[in-house]
Amino acid sequence: QVQLVESGGGLVQPGGSLRLSCAASGFTLGYYAIGWFRQAPGKEREGVSCITSNSGSTSYTDSVKGRFTISRDNALNTVYLQMNSLKPEDTAVYYCAASPVHWTTMSESAYTYWGQGTQVTVSS
């Protein structure tokens, strides 16, 4: 069964850090580009970051550049999102998704498999 499972979310104070993980089962994550998306209450889901299958290219939405870092360990079938200097506006449910394309994209239509999401809350 194809599955993506996110973990690592939680409650953190502004300025804090979290590392999200996206673990794949039922398919080889290394063949796919992986994107992280988020959806805040009352807002549409937006692309946060993505990484190509060989880690050769990454991209970030402007609001997280310099604070978030995406990486992957294909041997562990896992992708990570290191989030530093978190702000209240980063509060959202974070999803990872897998795409068969060989470039970075934050277009949701390019993504085939989706996880269930993990909640990130940034609050004092």
Image (tube, helix red, strand yellow):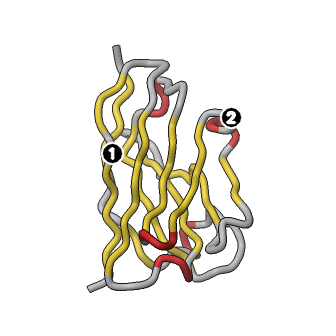
Dividing the picture into quadrants, the one containing residue 52 is bottom right
In which quadrant will I find the N terminus? bottom left
Residue behind mark 1? 8
Write down the residue under mark 2.
66
Residue furthest out toward the top: 124
Secondary structure under tag 2 reads loop
Amino acid type, label 2: Gly
Residue drawn at point x = 31 percent, y = 75 percent: 3
Which of the pair 18/44 is nearer the observer? 18
- Residue 94 lies left or right of residue 5; in this view the side is right
Q: Amino acid at mark 1?
A: Gly
Q: Residue at x 41, y 48 (%)?
A: 20
Which residue is rendered at x = 36% and y = 46% of the image? 93
What is the crowding at mark 2: few (fewer than 14 residues within 10 Å), some, or many (at least 20)?
Answer: few
Residue 4, image x, y percentages: 35, 69
* Residue 32 position within the rendered picture, expressed as x and y whole percent measured from the top left: 55, 78
Query: Is 59 rendered above or below residue 87?
Result: below
Image-quadrant location for residue 76: bottom left
Tell which circle, 2 or 1, labels the residue nearer the N-terminal end: 1
- Number of numbered labels in the structure image: 2
Above or below residue 104? Residue 91 is above
